[in-house]
Image (cartoon, grey):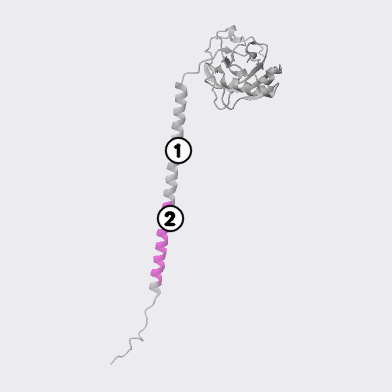
Amino acid sequence: MFDNLIESAPHKSSAGSWKTTFMSVLLHAGLISAAVYATLQAGESVEEVRQVDVTLQVQQQKKADEQKQEAAPPPPQVKGFQTLAIPTNIPVNIPPPSTQEFNAADFSGVGVEGGIARGQTEERQTVIRQDQPYLEAVVEERPERISSPPVRYPDILRQAGIEGRVLLELVVDTAGHAERGSIRVLSSTHQLFETPAREVAQSSLFSPGRIQGRAVRVRVQLPINFSIARAGGTTP
């Protein structure tokens, strides 16, 4: 009925299928390589564009700064003096006269070096500090005691005829009062004089120290004298 069995039929050659697979792999590899190359080229192009933009911005900013400098007026010369420079090379021939106006007052040595006699007075603003009190020696107006209560003379020392002196240090605030906690004894002839001296300092009123007309805190020294012979028995 059947001359040949179906299972025993000769198989077709697989050479054609192998070639097709190889060509497909080569094609896909080429497409992938092309895509990678295109991506790299695009990245390099974007980076080049960014570098060009940065360069242009720097150049524009530099040009704008130069224009501002050219437009800005020269700084005014301060009131002061000029310094004569000693020439390093002595000229052989007599140089032609200078066309600049000579003013002997510019070489007076008074004022700020580098300025001129008819220049503007340099205004120096003093920064008023608040963290630490000033010393009496550096303020323009020193604190002065305006009023103080009578000194309480210790009875035992009065009866014994003992006189003395207490030197205090304290900080006068901007309202003219001694800052609480700032009073300390620098020297004392007797320990019993110290408490009455502190009481006087704490209750005294001072004119505040000033710098450029502004009240500032100042550390001062305040002597309190105890004398029986004077009126009231004491002299603050």
Residue furthest toward the bottom? 1
Q: Which image quadrant is residue 163 in?
A: top right
Give 149 or 45, whichever is nearer the viewer.
149
Q: Identify the element where label 1 is drawn.
A: helix
Residue at 45% x, 38% y is: 54
Residue at 47% x, 30% y is: 62
Depth-wise, is mark 2 or mark 1 nearer the camera? 1
Report the quarter where the C terminus lies: top right
Residue type at tag 2:
Val
Residue corresponding to mark 1: 54
Left or right: where 83 falls relative to 70: right
Residue type at tag 1:
Val
Give 48 or 169, whichever is nearer the viewer.
169
Instruction: Confirm whether the magenta stretch covers residue 32.
Output: yes
Report the magenta stretch's main SS.
helix
Q: Which residues are magenta?
A: 18-39
Q: Is residue 59 above or below residue 45?
A: above
Residue 65 screen position, x and y as percent: 46, 27
Residue 60 screen position, x and y as percent: 44, 32
Gap between marks 2 and 1, in whole Å? 27 Å
Instruction: Confirm whether the magenta stretch covers residue 169.
Output: no
Residue furthest toward the left? 1
**Which badge, 2 or 1, comes first in the chain's sequence?**
2
Left or right: where 214 falls relative to 188: left
Residue 75 has which mark? none
